[in-house]
């Protein structure tokens, strides 16, 4: 647990978090690893955890009508999964490790419970997740704009 | 708005309004609708240019278009290498020209990338789509004089894996151990194992000292807007960011006003502008 607490405390995503919150969060965390090609989760499954990547890369993929598309890749220090935050807590895409990937897995039910029990912790978590969501929303907008059509 | 780079266009001794005849000596298909043409002046002149400048190319009887120079400034004839996407009548005609065909050339025109000013600094080169072509001369210059620069990061975004420009050169550059090269695509199928996501996501992943960095950005305007925002968020001041703007350039010498952007003419005061001197113009609609 000491090791996990240190990892959580030192991870950029949790930078500035109070010591007591680091301890609370660490209680919901565990170390995980995925081999290249292994899925972290599949679309439609229960979003009962999220991942903070420590190393490696993960592709977020969706099945279109006749093919599968990679919609984003995420790497070291980045977050995989936000569906654990909102009902019905189901993944909206597949997540597949592109290479050996090490991560901290957060038990979503555990963390949601702690956030409900201490709204200050919940607010700290929201402050960290909101920028990630906004950044991904903006990135998705740029992708939709398909901007690389006509530059000369 | 004052001109933004100290280095101005190479002096053109010929009448800048009069196209001179060049011939297509080499043509190479880079992408489905993108070709690189190597031209040769009929009078044998080797066009000297500074990275970032452009030429006006004429297909006789069809029309004239501004095209950035994408060649190596250190090579003879580098100023006559152009990478062209077939998007309109004249650019489409250019890409269909055969070997030996005549092309009218005026130029080179415009301001240049801050190759000299960047010396002693880290360099971030942020390119999107065909925006890599106007930046290629800067990349050649930096790599040819690598010891004068700090860390060098080339961050490139393309629409899809099939539309990665200059792929073999990117692969060569990646093999060098003195440059950080990251490529991402906006759209990919699952057989692509590279990065997927917009080019701005590469900025926080790159290694550079923001207070000692010169950043050059080229691509579609909205990509440059978000690209400079990402660099700003990373701590790079606007005074250290340079962008290449694109407008409808006609005369190329600041007379006709077609390419006016605020109080500047892109052909004469640009195409390379420093970000702080563009100010809020990037967010003005239909300017």
Image (tube, grey):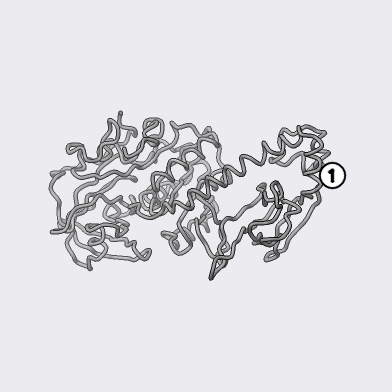
Residue B233, picture quadrant:
top right
In the image, what residue occupies the spot 36% across and 42% down?
Answer: B244
On the image, numbered disc 1 is attached to which residue?
A: A27
Kindly give the residue lying farthest to the bottom in the view shown. Answer: A66
- Quadrant for the N terminus of chain B in the image: top left
Horizontal arrangement in the rendering, residue B122 relative to residue B18 (left or right)? right
Subunit that carries the residue with mark 1:
A
In the image, what residue occupies the spot 58% across and 63% down?
Answer: B193
Residue placed most toward the observer, B40 or A110: A110
Query: Few, some or many C-alpha atoms within 10 Å of disc 1 (few <14, some 14-19, many ≥20)?
Result: some
Q: Position of residue B26 (x, y in %)?
A: 27, 65
On screen, residue B82 above or below A14: below
In the image, what residue occupies the spot 71% across and 36% down?
Answer: A15
On screen, residue B158 above or below A4: below
Residue A2, picture quadrant:
top right
On screen, residue B151 above or below A70: above
- Quadrant for the C terminus of chain B in the image: top left
In the image, what residue occupies the spot 45% across and 32% down?
Answer: B238
Count all numbered tags in the image, as a single digit: 1
Q: Position of residue B13 (x, y in %)?
A: 16, 42
Kindly give the residue lying farthest to the top in the view shown. Answer: B1
Q: Secondary structure at mark 1?
A: loop
Kindly give the residue lying farthest to the front in the view shown. Answer: A88
Q: Position of residue B126 (x, y in %)?
A: 46, 46
């Amino acid at each position: 647990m000491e090791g996990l607490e240190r990892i959580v405390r030192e991870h950029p995503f949790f930078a500035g978090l109070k010591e007591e919150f680091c301890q609370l969060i660490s209680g919901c965390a565990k170390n995980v690893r995925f081999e290249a090609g292994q899925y972290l989760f599949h679309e439609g499954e229960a979003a009962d955890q999220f991942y903070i990547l420590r190393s490696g890369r993960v592709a977020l993929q969706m099945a279109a009508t006749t093919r599968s598309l990679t919609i984003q890749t995420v790497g070291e220090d980045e977050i995989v999964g936000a569906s654990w935050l909102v009902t019905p807590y189901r993944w909206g895409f597949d997540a597949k490790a592109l290479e050996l990937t090490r991560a901290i897995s957060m038990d979503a039910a555990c963390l949601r419970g702690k956030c409900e029990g201490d709204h200050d912790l919940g607010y700290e978590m929201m402050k960290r997740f909101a920028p990630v969501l906004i950044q991904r929303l903006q990135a998705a907008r740029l992708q939709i704009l398909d901007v690389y059509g006509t530059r000369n | 708005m004052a001109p933004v780079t100290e280095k101005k266009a190479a002096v053109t001794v010929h009448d800048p309004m009069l196209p001179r005849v060049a011939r297509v000596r080499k043509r190479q298909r880079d992408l489905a609708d993108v070709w690189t043409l190597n031209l040769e002046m009929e009078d044998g002149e080797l066009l000297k240019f500074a990275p970032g400048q452009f030429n006006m190319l004429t297909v006789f009887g069809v029309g004239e278009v501004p095209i950035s120079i994408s060649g190596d400034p250190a090579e003879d004839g580098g100023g006559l290498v152009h990478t062209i996407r077939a998007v309109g009548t004249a650019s489409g005609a250019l890409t269909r020209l055969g070997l030996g065909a005549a092309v009218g050339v005026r130029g080179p025109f415009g301001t240049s990338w801050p190759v000299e000013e960047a010396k002693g600094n880290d360099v971030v080169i942020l390119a999107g789509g065909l925006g890599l072509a106007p930046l290629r001369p800067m990349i050649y210059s930096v790599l040819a004089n690598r010891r004068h620069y700090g860390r060098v990061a080339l961050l490139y975004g393309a629409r899809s894996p099939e539309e990665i420009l200059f792929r073999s050169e990117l692969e060569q550059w990646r093999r060098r151990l003195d440059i950080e090269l990251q490529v991402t695509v906006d759209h990919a199928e699952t057989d692509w194992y590279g990065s997927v996501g917009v080019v701005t996501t590469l900025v926080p992943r790159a290694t550079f000292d923001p207070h000692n960095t010169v950043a050059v950005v080229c691509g579609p305007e909205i990509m440059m807007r978000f690209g400079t925002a990402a660099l700003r968020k990373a701590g790079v001041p606007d005074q250290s960011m340079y962008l290449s703007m694109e407008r409808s350039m006609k005369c190329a010498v600041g007379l006709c006003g077609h390419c006016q952007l605020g109080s500047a003419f892109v052909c004469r005061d640009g195409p390379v502008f420093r970000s702080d001197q563009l100010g809020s113009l990037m967010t003005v609609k239909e300017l």
